[in-house]
Image (spheres, rainbow, N blue to C red):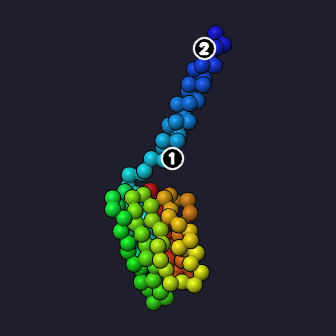
Amino acid sequence: MKRKTLFWAALLAVIALGAGAWWSLAPRSGTVAAVYVDGELYGTYDLTAAVIPYEVTVTTERGFNTLRIAHGGICVAEADCPGQDCVRQGEIHDSLIPIVCLPHRIVIEIEE
């Protein structure tokens, strides 16, 4: 009797872990990147619809940031700010950490 219980408990744990991994790695429907300049919405970009990567340049009086939008992610590909922290951050895929360019006052957030 103890073997059956152990078997079913192990099987249930494997199924739960598999479902959790699938849920965390599966692309979300309706994932949108919102770009703010000086706290105001500049534009929104649908990351699930971006089958072919494309670039958008955000130009302000302080400088420019070129954003690369790809399926499921967004990054700053190029910027003329001195620190280049926004470029070095790389591509983001979720809403945990936004991309921030302090010199240009640009914030990029993913909204799911």
Which is nearer the eye, 38 or 104?
104
Task: From this view, report whether residue 22 is shown above or below residue 3.
Answer: below
Q: Which residue is mark 1?
A: 24
Task: Kindly identify the residue that appears in the image at 51 percent across and 59 percent down.
Answer: 95
**Mark 2 Cα shell of 10 Å, populated few (<14), some (14-19), many (≥20):** few
The answer, for residue 37, to whether it is visible in the render is no
Alpha-carbon span between mark 1 and mark 2 = 30 Å
Q: Earlier in the sequence, mark 1 or mark 2?
A: 2
Which is nearer the eye, 31 or 14?
14
The answer, for residue 14, to whether it is visible in the render is yes
Secondary structure of the residue carrying tag 1 is: helix
Secondary structure of the residue carrying tag 2 is: helix
- Residue found at the far right of this picture: 2
The quarter of the rendered structure image containing the C terminus is bottom left
Image coordinates for residue 88, horizontal then vertical, percent: 56, 71
Q: Which residue is mark 2?
A: 4
Image coordinates for residue 94, horizontal then vertical, percent: 50, 58
Task: From this view, report whether residue 102 is shown above or below residue 2.
Answer: below
- Indicate left or right for 3 with 86 as reference: right
Q: Amino acid at mark 2?
A: Lys
Task: Kindly identify the residue that appears in the image at 52 percent across and 80 percent down.
Answer: 105
Image coordinates for residue 106, horizontal then vertical, percent: 50, 77
**Mark 1 Cα shell of 10 Å, populated few (<14), some (14-19), many (≥20):** few
Which is nearer the eye, 100 or 72?
72
Q: Amino acid at mark 1?
A: Ser
